[in-house]
Amino acid sequence: MTARLTLATALCVCASARAQAGFEWKAALDAGSVRQVMVAELDGAGPPELAILSATGELWVYSEPAPFAFVLSASLRTPGYALAVARGDLEGDGMPDLIASYYVFPGADGGLEPGLALFRNLGGAAFASPVTTPLGFMSFGLASGRIDGDPFDDLVVAAHSGTSIRLSGSPAGLVSPTPIGTNADHHSPVIADLDGDGLLDVVQDNWATQDLALLLQRADGGFPESTVALDGGGEAFPVIAADLDRALGPDLAVLTRSPPRRVWVFLSASQKPLSFRPPASFIIPSAAALASGDVDGDGWIDLVCGLGPDRQLAWLRGAGDGGFSPPEPFDTPGYAYSVEVADLDSDGRADALVGDPVAGLVHVLRSAFDAGAGGGADAGAGAGSDAGPPDAGFDAGPSDASVDAGSAGAAQASGCDGGCEPEAAPPPAPPPGCGCGHALVMALAAAAGVLRRRPG
């Protein structure tokens, strides 16, 4: 009887939220020990596909023939434990390939054997068996882009220990490894034209020195390095490049993981020479992942954090001038160690994909926000300004009071989606075949439809 009353109460509570802004649960996709979720156009037709990387080495590709109706179109596997995935047209044939970093343990010598696995796109949702490239280091972050202007995408491979490398794409696959950046631990490379000269640059975190490395490409192909301080913010992962204020070009949003965890916003102040305004930051103690996209359809980029064991997303609504409202929490059906946002139903609002490695699922959540419908925060308030308190029950911490909204200052990430180096381990997954708790969560979500904001 107790269980029945609890279920009925939960259904009533969730049903009462249907009229509220938030996220609607739409689907749960098998994802194993999900590490990263990526939305990418892979087959050249229709909506983009979902690529889900599991830490145990599986790489699943889901197509979406109808909104929120997903079909497993490819099941791939790396030679070992998987760390990160990216996509890029490395052969110049117009079909994006998939590249994953991995490691084998124990290797032939009893130690770690890290490498890259290239899955060539054969068309028609088919991929070739992986072609592997050995690495001399573990890599928790990959980024692809047409760095040298030829028809082939290149790959930046972040080095967990040592110097990151750049690999050139070619008809023969990945060739010509070249060091890029200095000797520091890196986890989150991003490729973007930061200074507006038409050449792609690289941004990556420096874990050893706890700052950001800006590698601005010269006309001769060199990448001299400068740094942006994080003021003791700690290890940064992920780094996101996006135009947050529609002004001078790509701005940066960064999640730092040393307590207290923060989301930093660096707005570009000038491109020639490149400089950033003083940063704004938000303290979000449980933040485990960060993504960017227009969640409410108002035309401005928002930020979304996955809050790991708190089973929540935190939404920072973009005001359009580079400012953000304080983090607003929304419950999710499970753990939120990775997050990606993308418009999956073409309604102009970015939906959320939330990775739960404990249940082995990626939850697909449809955005039910209306443009201009925030959660009580002043949408026009810049980052760091007094925009009102977050909802009760969610200790987001204060924004930095020293940052003026008008001067809040100055990378595409798949988001860490799952933690770069594993975070404090989530609770162990239930043994195979034990899905009672998961079944109850799914029943609640399916019956109620809306995942609502936590009540105050």
Image (spheres, rainbow, N blue to C red):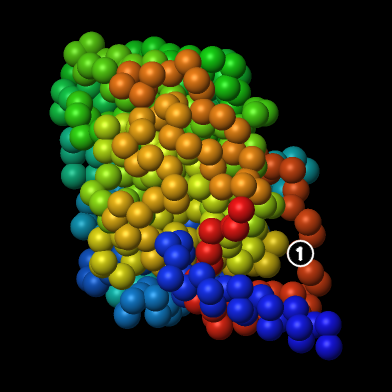
- Name the secondary structure under disc 1: loop
Considering only vertical position in the picture, is 130 above or below 181?
below
Picture quadrant of residue 352? bottom left
Can residue 194 be seen here? The reply is yes
Quadrant of residue 289 within the rendered picture: top right
Please name whichever residue, 260 or 230, is drawn nearer the observer in this view of the structure.
Answer: 260
Point out the residue furthest to the right here: 1
- Residue 263 is left or right of residue 10, and the answer is left
Residue 228 at x, y percent in the picture: 43, 16
Q: Position of residue 18 (x, y in %)?
A: 47, 73
Q: Is residue 91 visible?
A: no
> 86 and 285: which one is in front?
285
Identified at 18% across, 39% down, the residue is 150
Q: How crowded is mark 1: few (under 14 residues within 10 Å), some or many (20 or more)?
A: few
Q: Residue at x 38, y 19 (%)?
A: 404
454 in relation to 32, above or below = above
108 lies above or below 334? above
Which kind of residue does numbered mark 1 sit on?
Ala
- The N terminus sits in image quarter: bottom right
Work out whether residue 406 or residue 258 is closer to the camera in this orientation and state it.
Answer: 406
* Above/below status of 334 relative to 254: below
Q: Residue, x 78% and y 43% (percent of image)?
A: 110
Task: State the residue position of label 1.
Answer: 429
* Residue 188 point in image, percent of width and height: 48, 35
Q: Position of residue 36 (x, y in %)?
A: 52, 53
Q: Which residue is drawn at 16% across and 23% down?
A: 197
> How many marks on residues?
1
Q: In which quarter of the image is residue 232?
A: top right
Q: Is residue 80 left or right of residue 330?
A: right
